[in-house]
Amino acid sequence: MTREERIAGFSQLTRDIHDLDTGDKEELFRDVANNNPWFTAENIDQALNGLAYFLTPETLNNWLDNYTLPHEYKKIGIVMAGNIPLVGFHDFLSVIMAGHMAVIKLSSQDKVLFPVVLEMLLKINPNFGEQISVVDKLTEIDGVIATGSDNSSRYFKKYFKNMPNIIRKNRSSVAVLNGNETTEELQLLGDDIFSYFGLGCRNVAKIFVPEGHDMTGLLDALEGHQEIINHPKYFNNYEYNKAIYLVNRTQHLDTGYALFTQNKDIVSPLAVIYYEEYKDESELLSVLELNTDKIQCIVSNYNIIENRVPIGKSQLPEIDDYADNVNTMSFLCDI
């Protein structure tokens, strides 16, 4: 397939997804949720809309113009995560656009939705089939992109040590407030925190605030997300962590749908948001630098933060916002 054919195919994919019959879409969403209750209709819709954000001919062409695509065809294994719907799509897109074959090992948590998207792509252009293989075990591959937990990443590094690889481990995102945020900005921060129930690596799990900052304004602004507590699995996590804090007498703020507690760690439990006070800009930047390998992105409108993501935009990455700051396309072009 030519570059133009691939771009046309992926661009058409977003249109076909948008044009899905309402009944077909509802049936698909039910099937997906039956396999993974975390994948609600709202979350699936958000993931699909996220694809449309960067699968335009202009965006794809501008992206690919930055690379010299390889002439040699390689088989690239993709070990997909399943924490949020279609989380491995960008890796898949990158492999296909680089002209390689995507040898996909699906996550058991996303084994319904992703195959449907692949089927739609093949209907658009059956030639994509020459570049796609879904397998139970990765064998006879030339390189691998694997995403998982801290524990699984150690296994991946050992198992794939003799081939070119990108191995990703657990990360989460943080927000930095300077105290001058508007109510609207704080409301938007709720999207960065609670979308996908906080399960994504781009979800804000911790907030840095100025020393002595009054949290009341933030908590009031987040009330629009209180319905999240109605999801049974999220509610169970909330209740569990609340019980631990009460038994251990850990100081915390309880909104009735989320728990806020001061903690220097970056990654927080589900339904918990950590926060930490900083004395000045120097201390803040030092802490962020120290935790670079644990942070996926920094959500902030504070202009001292380089490479910051605007508040409310953490789940709308640009096509060249590579996970863990490792340039996937450069890896695929050089392999």
Image (cartoon, rainbow, N blue to C red):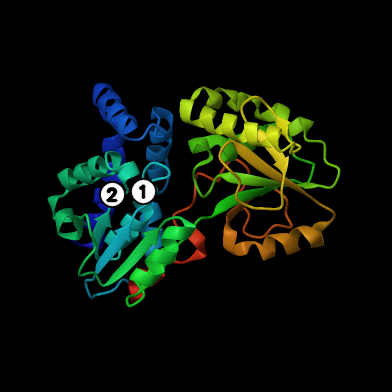
Give, as a three-letter code, the residue at label 1. Leu
Locate residue 308 relative to residue 42 in the image: left or right.
right
Instruction: Give the residue at x 31% y 34%.
Output: 35
Judged from this view, the residue extending furthest toward the front is 247
Going by the image, does 71 lie left or right of 287? left
Quarter of the image containing the C terminus?
Answer: bottom left
Few, some or many residues within 10 Å of mark 1 (<14, 14–19, 20+):
many
Up/down of 187 relative to 76, above or below? above
The picture places residue 110, in percent across and down from the top left corner, at 32, 43
Q: Tell me residue 108's x, y (percent).
A: 31, 45
Mark yes or no: residue 113 visible: yes
Residue at disc 2, secondary structure: helix
Query: Are the residues at dot 1 and dot 2 in contact (C-beta closer than 8 Å)?
Result: yes
Q: Decide if residue 90 is on the left or right side of residue 261.
A: left
- Residue marked by disc 1: 55
| Quarter of the picture holding the N terminus | bottom left
Q: Residue 288 in the image: x percent, y percent?
A: 69, 60
Looking at the image, which residue is at 15% across and 59% down? 130
Asked if residue 298 is positioned above or below residue 161 in the image, the reply reads above
Q: Residue sitting at 80 percent across and 58 percent down?
A: 281
How many numbered marks, from 0 up?
2
Could you say which disc has been placed on residue 10 in the image? 2
- Give the residue type at disc 2: Phe
Mark sitting earlier along the chain (1/2): 2
Query: In the image shown, does 175 or 150 lie closer to the viewer?
Result: 150
Q: Quadrant of residue 251?
A: top right
